[in-house]
């Protein structure tokens, strides 16, 4: 699967004014169609598996050049067309007025009944969400640049100094915010949050909040000169944007620490290569150089964890088999890992390490693996 | 009344000599169409109303008929039928109402509504044997005083017995008959008097018919046309349609002195050439006195009738209701959204019997049967077939009737009528003939003669196509309206959003978007129309093929003779 052609990617430096102009151009194009008595059409990039490809050169998931259109004069598209126009106007407003909103807020702002009917402009948030994604892809930008953001998730901890340019230029070190660390915002564009200084050797990305708390309590960050980021499951856009920026701006290596199961592996895969849903934005979000630290099935053997493994469920097995087919898992280490898991039909959680002792993960497991560079690619 | 009926009558008359009429009636209730309590009541109403209609028509009077049904007790009713007809005299009243099988329709080869049951005299008899009461008659001819009398039948002599005869001082022209009956039931069903009268009104738009139900509710089927239909012509029987029994019966009534002149005078299309042909092949001399014809000899003649190619019978004696009249009466009574009426050309079945088909398809409005709401409060309609034979409604033996079979043999889906059985459709079919081929003596179902089925199907397909076009057009119109509304409701939001982003005018955009929608719908409609026309042209081609198969047109070699 070698990319022949991809659609132009969003530019990091575009200003709100420039984005607003893009929206105006799009609207004017549609208005011209209407003036010319042509069925107005909104065009955007097609998303999903059929238009996502893995670029061998950059090692990133990228969106293909397939586009999709929504015509007003199509019974199946008409409502979506209207909804997209409404979302466009609203985000254009946000940009003009320098306001930001969550995707839930824009949903509520736009929801009302249509004329004298009993029908709503939007019945569910998923409808406005998909319009936002359409718009992002149509004008080649990310939602953050449309002054929109998803619900934040994820925590940052360690000796890293940030400046919040939108809030009195507050400067703070994530080491000094207590055990809870800094709640990662959903909007992490350089014009809002500046990464001022980092004193660490690497960035450790942790799947579960519980493991993050364990490592904080053990004083792991200080002892090992590490920055900790917990994702709380699948990493949110803001978290991924922060991981990307710390890596690219501060040149810190990124190690990912998840449960040894398909869900954990896919968290790693998204951080490293990007996700299918946001394939268009991989170069903003992904870190192709990230490494996988664990849990692995080798760990089970090395550390004698056989009695704390769990059986894979049917869903896990199906998912693991699918992943074996993904182009970005086509290397001998990962193929061996997935095959072994499928053969033994077992999975291992991060917290299973507590079977040895509470401090085992901080004192032995992680330092040893990092020292020996015992990673999966 | 057909020849078959005449001979049947002879038979019955013979039986009178041996049995009491009352006994005969009891035995033959089923044959005479008196099974069922509902059916009995409807049959009585039919007998009286038919008599009134026929009498009015013959006297060129626009009929005004009032039927009143009173409930006197459990399964005990009094039926009163009043008309504005020519009235009866002291002499004729007994014959018309007090003598079984002595109606004026006897021995006539003519399209008549016909007796489907027992005749009005039969009603007198029925009243007598079920209640022991006399039938009251008030009648006036317009000359002299009207009379009132009580009528019974002496079963032994088959003669009317008149009692309480008085002259009335009040002026009255017409006939009122009031009789009581037991063992019947008045309900509101498809086979009940109400539906019978509704259909009678549809087939007789020149008549005004009123029904007063036992509940005292008065229902009036208004006259929609003033002119009285032309009288059907009396026609001689065609040799192809006669059987041995009928021939020998007719031979007894003739004034002809020789068999040859009897055949030429009494039968249609029999001329010298045919007589010569017959003489060559029969064992006796055709100069013989027809009254002395033996059964075997009659058989020989009929055999020759079968062999010889006669010209088809005359069809000009038939009197269909006519497209305009059907249209007017269905419009008034059914009030459909769409109506297609077709009177086919007269043709012939079994080589000897002229007949003619009239078909109407009504859609929407009050068309279809059942106005009952279902659980969801929606009125559920069903397709309805109204069958008529010589304008008289047929209410019973639905399944066994050629009309029902023909309706069911048609693939209505092809005409765009999808859920045919549940569609709000009334199919009106009237079969006109001097001899309706009933399946049984009950006279409620028409036999599926090949030519009749063919004609029925062609007429139904023709009307069905037109109805289908209307129905699919209506459906399209609804869809178009729905689509328009669907697009239109999004327009204000789109226009206002675009106005918000740019400097465009919302009002202008709205107008332009509406224009776009209308244009699109117009285009779609034109496409669909073209598609439908393509489909319909396909079916009409098939129709032509069908009509080419018409068997009668192929008979070219006929003996050209005229009387």
Image: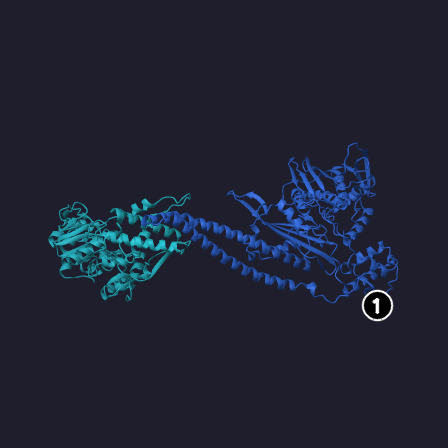
Chain colours: A cyan, B blue
Mark 1 falls on what kind of element? helix
**Residue A53 location, quadrant:** bottom left
What's the residue at 64%, 62% (across, down)? B547
Q: Is residue A178 above or below residue A9?
A: above
Q: Quadrant of the C terminus of chain A?
A: bottom left
Residue B23, percent from left and from top:
77, 44
Left or right: residue A282 compared with residue B182: left
Q: Which residue is mark 1?
A: B280
Q: Is residue A333 above or below residue B512?
A: below
Residue B351, percent from left and from top:
73, 61
What's the residue at 72%, 66% (across, down)? B556
Read off the chain for label 1.
B
Query: Considering depth in this image, is B29 or B175 the residue closer to the camera?
Result: B175
Residue A31, percent from left and from top:
36, 53
- Residue A352 visible at all: no
- Residue B75 visible at all: yes
Query: Considering depth in this image, is B161 or A97 the residue closer to the camera?
Result: A97
């Amino acid at each position: 699967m070698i990319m022949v052609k991809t659609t132009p990617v969003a530019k990091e430096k575009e200003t709100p004014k420039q984005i607003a102009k893009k929206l105006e151009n799009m609207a004017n194009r549609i208005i011209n169609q209407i003036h010319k008595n042509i069925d107005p059409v909104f065009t955007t990039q097609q998303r999903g598996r059929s238009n996502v490809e893995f670029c061998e050169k950059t090692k990133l998931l990228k969106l293909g050049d397939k586009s999709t259109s929504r015509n007003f004069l199509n019974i199946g598209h008409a409502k979506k067309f209207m909804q997209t126009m409404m979302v466009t106007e609203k985000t254009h407003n946000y940009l003009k007025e320098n306001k930001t909103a969550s995707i839930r807020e824009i949903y509520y702002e736009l929801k009302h009944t249509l004329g004298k009917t009993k029908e709503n402009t939007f019945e569910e948030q998923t409808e406005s969400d998909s319009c936002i994604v359409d718009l992002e892809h149509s004008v080649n930008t990310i939602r953050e640049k449309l002054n929109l953001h998803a619900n934040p998730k994820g925590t940052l901890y360690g000796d890293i100094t940030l400046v919040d340019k939108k809030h009195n230029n507050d400067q703070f070190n994530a080491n000094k915010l207590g055990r809870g660390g800094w709640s990662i915002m959903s909007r992490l564009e350089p014009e809002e949050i500046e990464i001022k200084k980092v004193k660490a050797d690497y960035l450790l990305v942790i799947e579960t909040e519980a493991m993050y708390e364990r490592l904080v309590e053990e004083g792991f960050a200080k002892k090992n000169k590490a920055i900790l980021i917990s994702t709380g499951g699948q990493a949110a856009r803001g978290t991924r944007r922060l991981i990307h920026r710390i890596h690219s701006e501060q040149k810190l290596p990124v190690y990912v620490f998840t449960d040894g199961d398909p869900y954990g592996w896919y968290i790693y895969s998204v951080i490293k290569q990007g996700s299918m849903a946001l394939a268009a934005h991989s170069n903003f979000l992904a870190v192709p150089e990230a490494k996988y630290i664990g849990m692995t099935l080798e760990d089970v053997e090395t550390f004698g964890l056989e009695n704390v493994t769990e059986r894979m469920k049917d869903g896990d097995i199906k998912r693991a088999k699918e992943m074996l087919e993904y182009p970005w898992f086509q290397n001998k280490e990962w193929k061996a890992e997935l095959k072994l898991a499928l053969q033994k039909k077992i999975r291992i959680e991060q917290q299973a390490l507590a079977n040895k002792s509470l401090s085992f993960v901080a004192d032995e497991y992680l330092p040893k693996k990092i020292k020996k560079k015992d990673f999966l690619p | 009344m057909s020849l078959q009926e005449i001979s049947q009558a002879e038979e019955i008359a013979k039986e009178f000599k041996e049995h009491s009429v009352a006994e005969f009636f009891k035995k033959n209730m089923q044959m005479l169409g008196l099974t069922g309590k509902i059916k009995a009541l409807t049959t009585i109403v039919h007998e009286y109303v038919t008599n009134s209609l026929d009498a009015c028509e013959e006297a060129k009077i626009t009929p005004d008929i009032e039927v009143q049904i009173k409930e006197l007790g459990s399964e005990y009713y009094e039926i009163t039928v009043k008309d504005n007809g020519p009235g009866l005299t002291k002499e004729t009243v007994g014959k018309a109402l007090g003598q079984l099988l002595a109606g004026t329709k006897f021995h006539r080869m003519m399209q008549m509504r016909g007796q489907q049951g027992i005749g009005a005299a039969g009603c007198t008899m029925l009243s007598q044997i079920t209640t022991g009461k006399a039938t009251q008659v008030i009648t006036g001819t317009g000359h002299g005083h009207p009379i009132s009398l009580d009528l019974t039948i002496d079963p032994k002599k088959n003669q009317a017995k008149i009692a309480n005869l008085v002259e009335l001082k009040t002026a009255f022209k017409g006939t009122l008959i009031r009789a009581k009956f037991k063992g019947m039931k008045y309900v509101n069903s498809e086979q009940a008097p109400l539906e019978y009268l509704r259909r009678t009104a549809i087939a007789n738009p020149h008549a005004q018919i009123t029904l007063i139900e036992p509940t005292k509710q008065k229902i009036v089927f208004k006259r929609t046309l003033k002119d009285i239909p032309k009288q059907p012509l009396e026609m001689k029987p065609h040799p192809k349609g006669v059987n041995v029994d009928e021939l020998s019966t007719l031979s007894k009534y003739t004034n002809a002195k020789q068999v040859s002149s009897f055949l030429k005078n009494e039968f249609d299309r029999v001329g010298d050439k045919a007589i010569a042909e017959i003489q060559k092949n029969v064992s006796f001399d055709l100069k013989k006195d027809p009254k002395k014809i033996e059964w075997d000899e009659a058989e020989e003649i009929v055999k020759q009738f079968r062999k010889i190619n006669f010209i088809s019978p005359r069809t000009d004696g038939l009197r269909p209701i006519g497209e305009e009249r059907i249209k007017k009466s269905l419009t008034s009574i059914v009030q459909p959204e769409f109506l297609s009426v077709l009177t086919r050309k007269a043709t012939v079945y079994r080589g000897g019997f002229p007949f003619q088909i009239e078909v109407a398809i009504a859609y929407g409005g009050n068309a279809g049967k059942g106005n009952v709401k279902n659980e969801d409060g929606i009125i559920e309609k069903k397709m309805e077939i109204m069958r008529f034979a010589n304008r008289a409604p047929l209410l019973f033996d639905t399944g066994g009737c050629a009309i029902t079979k023909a309706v069911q043999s048609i693939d209505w889906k092809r005409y765009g009528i999808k859920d045919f059985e549940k569609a709000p459709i009334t199919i009106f079919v009237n079969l006109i003939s001097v001899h309706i081929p009933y399946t049984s003596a009950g006279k409620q179902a028409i036999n599926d003669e090949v030519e009749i089925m063919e004609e029925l199907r062609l007429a139904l397909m023709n009307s069905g196509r037109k109805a289908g076009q209307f129905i699919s057009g209506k459906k399209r119109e609804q869809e178009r309206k729905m689509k328009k509304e669907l697009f239109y409701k999004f327009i204000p939001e789109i226009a206002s959003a675009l106005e918000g982003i740019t400097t465009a005018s919302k009002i202008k955009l709205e107008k332009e978007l509406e224009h776009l929608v209308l244009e699109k719908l117009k285009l779609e409609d034109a496409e669909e129309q073209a598609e439908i026309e393509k489909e319909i042209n396909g079916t009409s081609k098939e129709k032509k093929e069908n009509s080419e198969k018409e068997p009668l047109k192929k008979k070219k070699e006929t003996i050209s003779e005229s009387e």
